[in-house]
Amino acid sequence: MLGADCSSNPPILNGSSGAGYVANFGGVSSYIIGSHLSLLAIVLVSDVYGYKTPNLRKIADKVAAAGYFVVVPDFFHGDPFDRNNTNRPMPVWIKDHQPDKGVETAKPIIEALKRQGVSAIGAAGFCWGGKTVVDLANSGEIQVAVLSHPTYVTVDDIERINIPIAILGGQNDTAFPPAKLHQFAQILNAKKPKVDSYAKVFPNVAHGWTLRYGPNDPKAVKAAEEAHKDMLNWFDKHLKH
Ligand SMILES: *[C@@H]1O[C@H](CO)[C@@H](O)[C@H](O)[C@H]1NC(C)=O
Ligand SMILES: *[C@@H]1O[C@H](CO)[C@@H](O)[C@H](O)[C@H]1NC(C)=O
Ligand SMILES: *[C@@H]1O[C@H](CO)[C@@H](O)[C@H](O)[C@H]1NC(C)=O
């Protein structure tokens, strides 16, 4: 299900990109940006390419500029998916990085945020990271969730959601097709009328479009930036009140 679609348009990794810095946070090497005095924190959970992709760090920088303390952990402990490694295609790599194990990596990070004095936490997951975000939501670790083109998220996960959640999908995404997004939205509307939810399908974009867009493709950049804005608006709406 993840397969080729999730690993298309591989980004160049660059561990020194972004305006923030890399440090150990909650036992995990993380890209960090934003004021340590902020009471509000956002955890960004990467796709299979990990925390060194310049586009993900740009998103972190944008979120921090809105007043949040932002942590982008290395969920793969130095071992992101490498499409060039033909000995380790996605079905093999994923065995070492099961999406449902991400929550265990994230819990000490949430603890560290609380020790720092943070009072509310939002999380956004991209592709692989979507599962970690619903697991954090369903274990009461975070207050607001955003999923962008998530994979591995199940109907059961969505049925258990009890916090505000926004789900962003692409019209041409075959890994997380619009039909699945509409199914999730319907479940939330029908079963969780008191939980604020938001679902949106972006026209003419394929899987991974919020992260793996080419910087020289104006249409792709525009769609990605619109998605980033929707994500930030959702955090602002539910965390800054
Ligand atoms: C990585 O990012 C740094 C900081 O933005 C930049 O100076 C450098 O040129 C980048 N390297 C590559 C290979 O893109
Ligand atoms: C993968 O191979 C392509 C084409 O040879 C190359 O441009 C790219 O830098 C490689 N990526 C990594 C992560 O090594
Ligand atoms: C997306 O799907 C629509 C409807 O099938 C199609 O008209 C459009 O060309 C597709 N866009 C891309 C970028 O593949």
Image: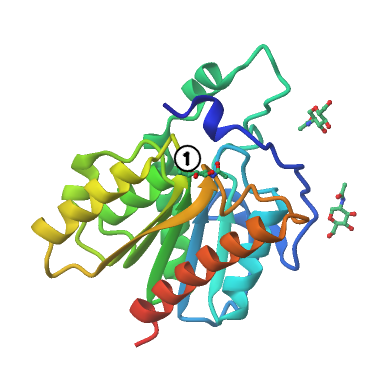
Name the image quarter holding residue 121.
Answer: bottom left
Residue 30: x percent and y percent?
62, 54
Decide which of 203, 49 is in the foreground and name it: 203
Residue 185: x percent and y percent?
24, 55
Residue at 46% in and 81% down: 39
Residue 12: x percent and y percent?
77, 42
Viewed as shown, does residue 227 lie left or right of 16?
left
Residue 23 seen in this snapshot:
no
Crowding near the residue tagged with mark 1, few <14, some 14–19, many ≥20 C-alpha atoms within 10 Å? many
Residue under label 1, please give it: 128
Q: Give the quarter of the figure containing the C terminus.
A: bottom left
- Does 224 appear above or below 85? below
Residue at 59% in and 66% down: 225
Decide which of 241, 173 is in the foreground and name it: 173
Tag 1: amino acid: Trp
Mark 1 lies on a secondary structure that is loop
- Does 169 appear above or below 232? above
